[in-house]
Image (cartoon, helix red, strand yellow):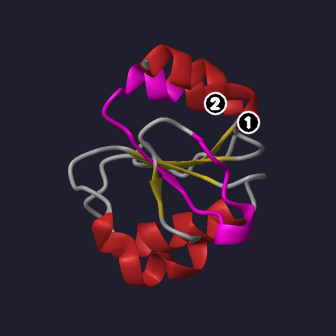
């Protein structure tokens, strides 16, 4: 796991991400895949802002909540993470899933049901 500080957590494994979401139930989950790779249905309640639009649409993410980014394999979420580190210093805790989130989506969705 890459940890920069307590505000910018960097990459969390899928298992760590699920624990993070349970510890921070007000987290905003943002899928950052482009349209072709979008995971549907994905995480229940997640936003979708493609990584290549994040620099223009970052203000759509609600304020005052932790934010967890994900894509299909943990690659383009790093790009979106870097944009948000720069553009959204108000995000209290920022992280991304380093790897495929699919292994924890069903567990999360069942927990949120």
The residue sitting at 28% across, 45% down in the picture is 65
The residue sitting at 41% across, 75% down in the picture is 86
Q: Nearer the viewer, residue 39 or 95?
A: 39
The residue sitting at 31% across, 55% down in the picture is 91
Quadrant position of the N terminus in the picture? top right
User: Vertical placement of 105 versus 107: above or below?
Assistant: below
Residue 64: where, in percent of width, then height?
A: 21, 48
Residue 108: where, in percent of width, then height?
A: 55, 23
Residue contact at pointers 2 and 1, CB within 8 angstroms: yes
Q: What is the secondary structure assignment of the residue under circle 1?
A: helix
User: Vertical placement of 18 versus 94: above or below?
Assistant: above
Q: Nearer the viewer, residue 35 or 64?
A: 35
Residue 104: where, in percent of width, then height?
A: 67, 27
Q: What is the secondary structure assignment of the residue under circle 2?
A: helix
Residue 105, numbered circle:
2
Q: Nearer the viewer, residue 16 or 33?
A: 33
Q: Which residue is mark 1?
A: 102
Residue 85, numbered circle:
none
Instruction: Identify the residue at the far left of this view.
Output: 64
Q: CA distance from mark 2 to mark 1?
A: 5 Å
- In the figure, is residue 17 to the left or right of 89? right
Residue 113, quarter of picture: top left
User: Which span of residues is magenta-colored?
Assistant: 20-42
């Amino acid at each position: 796991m890459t940890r920069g500080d307590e505000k910018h957590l960097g990459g969390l494994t899928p298992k760590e991400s699920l624990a993070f979401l349970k510890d921070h139930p007000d987290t905003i989950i943002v899928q950052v895949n482009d349209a072709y790779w979008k995971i549907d249905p994905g995480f229940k309640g997640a936003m979708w802002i493609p990584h290549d639009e994040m620099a223009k649409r970052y203000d759509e993410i609600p304020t005052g909540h932790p934010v967890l980014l994900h894509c299909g394999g943990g690659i383009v979420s790093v790009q979106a993470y870097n944009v948000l580190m720069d553009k959204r210093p108000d995000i209290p805790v920022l992280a991304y899933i380093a790897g495929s989130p699919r292994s924890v989506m069903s567990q999360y969705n069942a927990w949120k049901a």
